[in-house]
Amino acid sequence: MATTTQDLPAALGGAPVFVQTARESDTLDRWRQITEEEAQVAYDMTLRNELSGGTPVVREFEQMWRERHDTRFAITVINGTAALHSAMFGLGVGPGDEVICPTYTWICSVSPALMLMAKPVFCESDPETLLIDPDDVRRCITPRTKAILAVHLWGNVCDMDALMEISRDTGVPVIEDCSHAHGATYGGRPCGSIGQVGAWSLQGSKPASGGEGGVVATNDVQAFERACLIGQVNRVAGLDLVTDNYEHLQPLGLGIKFRAHPLGIGIASVQMNKLDELNARRSAYIEAVEAGLGDLPGVEPMGVYPGAERGGFYGFFVRYDAEKANGLSTDRFIAALREEGLGARGNGYPLLHRLPLFADGFDIFTEGRGPLCTPEMGGDYQGYSDGDFPVTEAAVSRLVFLPVLSDPVEDAPQRTLAALSKVLRHSEALARTA
C-alpha cells in the first residue's frame, strides 16, 4: 500500500498528529492550576491582615502537613531552597563537611551546602530511574560526609531501603528533597518522612503551589529546633519547641528570616486539598502512555523501584535508544515529535558537574575561603570534568521529556502514542534527512 501524506511525519511533509502550543495547550489539557477558590482564600486573608508570621492559616497548614506526612514537626519557609538550607543546618552541616548529591538534579538541591561552607560531592544516577545510585553513594562516603541528598527527581522515588541502610551503616543522615514528588510514597510511607529530614518546594510550577514557599518536616528534635533557629526569627509562638537548648536565643534566633508568606501558604492549603485528585489524573495519563510503549522500538519508560509510588509527576520522560530507531539521533527524534505538535524536549537539567561553578571552582567568599576554592585559589577543591560520570552522562543524553497533562482530554494518551509511533515508523527516512 502506498504511503499517503497523512501517514508521513510532519518532518517529511505529512500532517501533524495534533497541535499543542502554549497558545493552544487546552487542546490536550483542561487543567487550571489557580481557581476562584485560591483567590478567595488570599482575599479573605488580606482582609484579616494575615500577611506576616505564623498566622492561624500557617499553623493549620503545618499541622495538616505533620498529619499527612506522619512527622512530629513541620515548618513553612520561603521556598524549597530555604527548606533544604534549613534541613542541612538542622543536621549540623557546616565548614569542611561534604554533602553527597547526584549530579543530575536542579542546582538548588545542593547550593545551600555552599552557603554553609560545605563541599558538594557528586555521584552517579541509576540509568533506568535517573535517581541517585546507592552503590555510588557508598563509594563517595568519607569521614567528612555530613549528609546524603536523596532527590525524588521528576516525582519518581529513590531506593530508600538502600539509602537508609547506608545511613544506618555509616551514621550519615539522609535528606529527602521532595520538591518534585508531592504525595509520593515508598513502602507505604510518605516521602519526606523516611530520611532524617524532608524538604519540599511550593514554587509556582509545583504540583502543590503557593507561588513561592517551602516546607521542612522531620521527627528529629534537634534538626527541627536548629531549623527554627536559623530561619524563624520572631516566630516562636506556634512552633512547639521541645527543649530549652536555644531558649536563651529566642525569639530572634540567628536573626534570619526564612518565614513563608502567609498568603502563599493559604493558596498552598487549597492546592493540597486538590493534590490527590491531581496525582490520580497525572498518574493515569502517564501510565497509559507508558503501557503503550512496549510496541514502539527505541523507547522505554522510566524505571520505578519496587515499593515506590510516584507522586507530583513534575516531569515525564522516556528513555530513547537511537540504535533501535535506525540511528535517528535524540535531537532529531525530539524535533520530529515537536513537528507533530507534541511538546517534547531534552534532558531537563544540566548536569551539575558540567557547570563552570562546580567544574572550575569559584572563590565564593573571596580570599580563598570558600568550599569551591581550587589550589590556585588557596583551597583544595579539585573540580570536575566532562566524563567524570559516564553512566549519568550517557543516560541523560537519551532522555526525551513528554508533556505532563493534569486534566487531559479523553484520547490524549492515544494521541501522544500516535505521535511517537508515527515518528518511529519513519525513523530511517528521518535519519537520512537529518
Image (cartoon, rainbow, N blue to C red):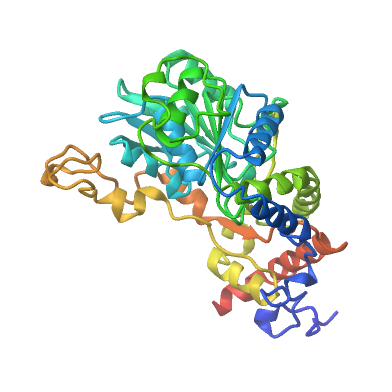
Camera-nearest residue between 301 and 174 = 174
Residue 364 x %, y %:
23, 48
Residue 246 x %, y %:
40, 20
Q: Is residue 313 visible?
A: no
Image quarter in which the N terminus is found:
bottom right
Residue plotted at (62% across, 36% down): 157
Camera-nearest residue between 158 and 239 = 239
Left or right placement of residue 134 versus residue 22 in this view: left
Camera-nearest residue between 403 and 206 = 206
Residue plotted at (75% across, 65% down): 421
Residue plotted at (75% across, 62% down): 32
Q: Is residue 210 visible?
A: yes
Residue 414, quarter of picture: bottom right
Residue plotted at (52% across, 27% down): 197
Image quarter in which the C terminus is found:
bottom right
Camera-nearest residue between 251 and 276 = 251
Classify 424 as above or below 207.
below
Classify 294 as above or below 20.
above
Residue 249, quarter of picture: top left
Classify 165 as above or below 24.
above
Residue 61 x %, y %:
67, 37
Residue 6 x %, y %:
80, 82
